[in-house]
Image (cartoon, rainbow, N blue to C red):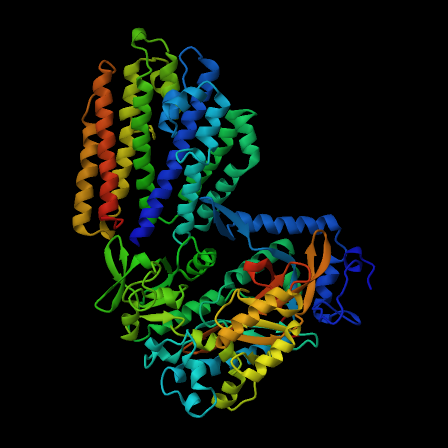
Amino acid sequence: MLSRVADTIYWLARYMERTQSMLQVIRTNYIASQDEIRYFSWRPLLYAYGELTSTEVNEIERDTPRVLEHLVLDKLNSASAYSNIMQGRENARAVQDHITKEVWQCLNDYYHYVRDNEVAQQVKLGDPVSGIDFLMRNSLLFTGTVKNTMPRDESYAYINIGKFLERAIQTADIIRIKWSGVSYDIQQSIETPELRYLLYSLFGYELFVKTYKGNFSPNNVLQMILYNTYFPHSLLYSLNQISRYFERLKEASLPESYEQLEFLIGKVKNEVKYSHFTADDPEQLNNFLLQMRDELYGVATAFSKYYFGNS
Amino acid sequence: MNENALLRSYQEQPNVWDEMFNLEGIRPEYKKFVAAIENLASAEMTRKDELAKKLFMSQGITFTVYSSGEGIEKIFPFDIIPRIIKNEEWKHIESGIKQRLKALNIFLKDIYHQQFIIKDGIIPASLIYSCPQFLREMVNVDVPFDVYTHVAGVDLIRDQDGDFYVLEDNLRTPSGVSYMLENRSITYRIFPDLLPKNNVQPVKDYPDILFRNLRALADGRSSDPTVVLLSPGIYNSAYFEHTTLARLMGIRLVEGRDLIVHNNFVYMKTTKGLKQVDVIYRRVDDEFLDPLVFRPDSALGVPGIYSAYRKGNVAIVNAMGNGVADDKAVYAYVPDMIRYYLNEEPILKNVPTYQMADADKRKLVFDNMDKMVIKRTNESGGYGMLIGSSATEEQMESFKKAITEDPRSFIAQPIISLSSTPCYINGVLQPRRVDLRPFALCGPSGIDIVPGGLTRVALKEGSLVVNSSQGGGSKDTWVLGAD
């Protein structure tokens, strides 16, 4: 496979995963803003998915419609959902002959959809949840279309490596950002809203209540979002998937390139797998998540160098 | 003429050949089609028109105009009423194009080798050597199977008597074939059953024939050749076409930066190292192809590709240097080439062409400028052109000045009144001018032309310019089977 094509497909998947992940976080945050006004703030999200200065953040952080517009629809914000979808589609356009026609049309429709005035009206002036849900349905459609139509060749491996690498980075970031808001004075087994929203942000609330039957301790939450291999948004699950799809590239790799990546991926995966964190020491957790994030970026850089010819 | 409101409102133009109507009414080749639409309510036609637009948009059959950092998607305008060509007419066009391409291909081989046509005094040497597209780098380069013009998109127009004329041969990197294919796929969705009922010949074989020809060029070098399509990238307005063709043929779409030349062999950079490339269907112009030989500032090409080509280590399609046969001043000599090389009379007519380098002709043209089209010899896309009948005094003067300064770079032709055909615009049928670009494929085994082509429409009322860059659109082109 052409290095440029592999690079483009991998980034296409990263942009789409990032879109889906951020839309869910924004959706959850919006609901929290209506429900839990006491602890609520848009600030962490404005820093994570925006490019505003602190003065600008101060200016708009209490104006929910403006915040939503900036995070979801702002063309000038290169981290907005709009920009991610546009980039994803632009990448798809450049590798149209390596993805199926269905995948391309799905992304193309998504792009036209996010440009549509109706969605903008819904997000800004109507019911933002419906607006975001419409967008997320397109994300799900993309995921399903990839699964159902793409041949299981190298392209598919790169799509999945991109997707799970992005998911691992996002999961680490979301845990880090949200965990800092968890209040530790109520470490009993009653439900705390921050933990609930963290689980919603990671699509994990339903599984959690089924698994832990209402025992809402921070330790249980952490156990699930870091280590549960049945939960597709846990950190370990994503790392296992990266490793799994990477192994498929063995035949199509130069041996020395494969060795380099195999080492880096194996290292970060095992560091998570053989770690043991509880909710007792938030600072240690924070440092660990930061370190994992750096190592994941290291994996991305190594792909760029050894597989995408950007050395 | 007709009871139906859609047809009744249609105004034919005087002294223009109408593709759908003649003095007696509807032409026979259009009768079945008209019968199928004449009873449709106008809302239904409008729905079809909107459906077509929606399909183009959702399938991404668009070109992107980049402004202020944001890409704006544009559809190449499509008119839902097809242009229909009778079987006998098509046979005439087909044999005429084959004859021309045969002669042009021999001409290219001759002009880059022995140059008999100059020595025998058929074409003046000065005309060839003053042509910027004549590449000295191609002299004595042997191309595989002596084929130069692998893909040609010959532009035909029809004058008021209904005769077809060749306007341009387009032997370099003609585009538009994806629209021929896509227009057809849209037509069968908006007019179910009409294609089989009218016995319309299919165009879908085009990619298969092209791929067969491309593979054949590597014959003898590799049993499983690597064929790629070289595109300038996503910012090119024909990028959609490049991806469509690559996808339909199942070949890789590469950009200049994906290729590298090593020891006069061309390789592509893959995730598993370098892989040799045998055949390149390039959609990058000659001057950008190799920065070491042509334009040094080109980032679209591949350094060293020319030497690999010269050594015969890679086949490039179309051959380099074809522009000399595409030059509008050389065009005037194509009928002579046909007589000289093939000893045949041309089947398709040329538009009479006056060389501005000839002082007598120049005077004749200057005296009758309002009846002339003046064109630059090396430009296309409707640029560098003056249509006398609609030009201002000022424009004429500036052209006269430019011609006097550099007469070799201009030719003049009498204005041909392009034929018109009904288009569905704003809910009514209106006449608009059209041309026809069939696509011919030359390979080691001969010349194939799929029955069809791109009918381009000048969508502006009264306009004679059909180029997409100048507000043109397109129609599906139906070539009917034999009765």
The image shows residue B322 at horizontal and vertical percentages of: 42, 74
Q: Is residue A274 visible?
A: yes
Q: Nearer the viewer, residue B78 or A202?
A: B78
The quarter of the displayed image where residue A295 is located: top left
Residue in the picture at 55% in, 83% down: B359
Quadrant for the N terminus of chain A in the image: bottom left
The image shows residue A112 at horizontal and vertical percentages of: 52, 41
Q: Is residue B222 visible?
A: no
The quarter of the displayed image where residue B24 is located: bottom right
Q: Nearer the viewer, residue B429 or A244?
A: B429
The image shows residue B353 at horizontal and vertical percentages of: 57, 79
Q: Tell which residue pokes out farthest to the bottom in this image.
A: B120
Q: Nearer the viewer, residue B182 or B205?
A: B182
Horizontal arrangement in the rendering, residue A188 relative to residue B404 (left or right): left
The image shows residue A109 at horizontal and vertical percentages of: 51, 43
Residue in the picture at 50% in, 61% down: B178
Horizontal arrangement in the rendering, residue B86 relative to residue A150 (left or right): right
The quarter of the displayed image where residue A28 is located: top left
Q: Nearer the viewer, residue B16 or B241?
A: B16
**Can you say whether B359 is above or below B472 in the image?**
below
